[in-house]
Amino acid sequence: MHIMHCRQQIFRQSVQNSFRQLMADTNDIRGARLSLLRLQEVYNMKSLDMIEGNYLGFKGPPLGPRDAFEIGQTAFTVGKLNISLDWLTLSLQMYRSLHGADVEQMLFRPSEGSIKALIGRVHLFRGDDDEAERLYNEAKILDPTNGDVLELGKELQIKPRAEPIPTVDYFQNFSRLCSLENRNYPADPSNPKIRCRYREALLPYYRFKEEILSISPFASVIYDFVSEDESKHLKSFVENKLERGKVGGNNSVISDIRTSDLAWIWDNDSTKAKTLAKKIEHVTGLDTSQRLPDGPSSGEAFQVVNYGLGGHYEVHMDPFDAAPEQGELQYSGERIATFLIYLSDVQRGGSTVFTRVGIAVAPKKNMALFWYNFDPAHQKDDLTHHAGCPVLIGQKWICNKWIWTYGNTFRRRCGLTPDATQLDIEEDMKHGYKWH
Ligand SMILES: O=C(O)CCC(=O)C(=O)O
Ligand SMILES: [Fe+2]
């Protein structure tokens, strides 16, 4: 009972904080609405449940008719037509049953005509001209000068009309994988090579529990990879340094594709970071050395990332489209492998999913997820498309270490046969990497 109460408290606070922080900046308010819409779509939540403050069993603040209107409006602007219709219709119903009691919700109340016009516009974009026309005729009487009413009037004049916006279903698999919870789901559980094993690091007694999740591309998780002390260090080191994560060339663009804050730690920044980089080297067998300031490096700085409520990272691959030509990493090649460490548990949501091979990894504090972004023939592996699911309840902390081509040519060998998998290569390397 007490735990439940605390969770509710934390959830309510985090929703309220997100809304409060957002008051100052309209871009952020829009971001918060988009986050709610994303959570709704990914985890298949019903608008009515969210209005009642029910987020998959967790209690959050209830939403009013104005919230519903604004969420519906935002959904419309990003082409989420079905969801928009849902929210706008609920807003209309709620306004009708509201009798001036809730002052905050009544303030800046949109007129019934404007809600109807917006609903009409949604119908029009869905290809239902008759319903749009009907709503326009009603709205025009109720609020003839409203912007949406005028807009709908203009849109109805345009003939022939643009094709209806197709409903997006590309992320069906993403949504399904994100909704799996509590444990890891491997790519092909019936494959006997999908198993647990000990992974030795340098010395025989220094070993880690590894659960293989996929053979091609090779992906596995390593339990208890970092100590409490190490994970605490990584998070406290970046305190006050976190900045909004970016995407694109040189990581320069703020985008809704990635909603998280992050900071970097170079191996030389702390003894603990250096030791951790060595541990990754020992467990993966790959070089991670940084030869700064001018030399090519084999590993990138640790990237510590914090996702708040609704924080996510859309489906992507980690290698660059073109390797950077300047800076510390020039000549270093590409991100051949990713070593991702979870620095927190996540109460609900926040899994890492591989949409093309069907892997779901449930974040577990101190566990690492390791995979190769390139296949054994050194081709960028399209099957490594992955995403960070939105965080539904709680916070998510991770730390990435990308491992580069430079220094790893002889450590990550190619296969001795064209169809060799990573496991075959490891086996061959144990036996001196000789042709059979
Ligand atoms: O947050 C996650 O689970 C995935 C993060 C990720 O893919 C990245 O940072 O490149
Ligand atoms: Fe990634």
Image: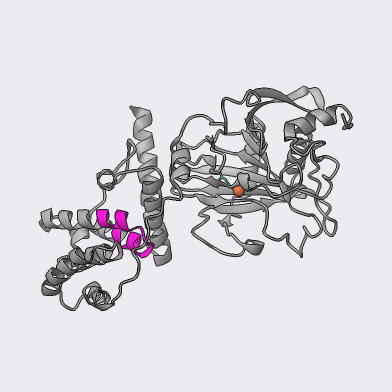
Q: Main secondary structure of the magenta part?
A: helix
Q: Which quadrant of the structure image shows residue 399?
A: top right
Where is residue 222? Give x, y as percent. 65, 31
Relative height, residue 403 to residue 96 (above, below): above
Instruction: Identify the residue shown where x is 45% and y is 48%.
Output: 171
275 or 201: nearer the eye?
201
Where is residue 225? Give x, y as percent. 67, 32
Relative height, residue 80 to residue 272 (above, below): below
Instruction: Identify the residue shown where x is 65% and y is 63%.
Output: 249
* 85 within the magenta span: yes
Q: Which quadrant of the structure image shows residue 393?
A: top left
370 or 276: nearer the eye?
370
In the rendered image, the quadrant that contains the C terminus is top right
Q: Which quadrant of the structure image shows residue 122?
A: bottom left
Q: Is residue 113 rendered to the left or right of residue 386?
A: left
Residues shaded magenta: 72-87
Where is residue 422? Give x, y as percent. 73, 35
247 or 226: nearer the eye?
247
Q: Is residue 166 rendered to the left or right of residue 151?
A: right
Instruction: Identify the residue shown where x is 36% and y is 43%.
Output: 44
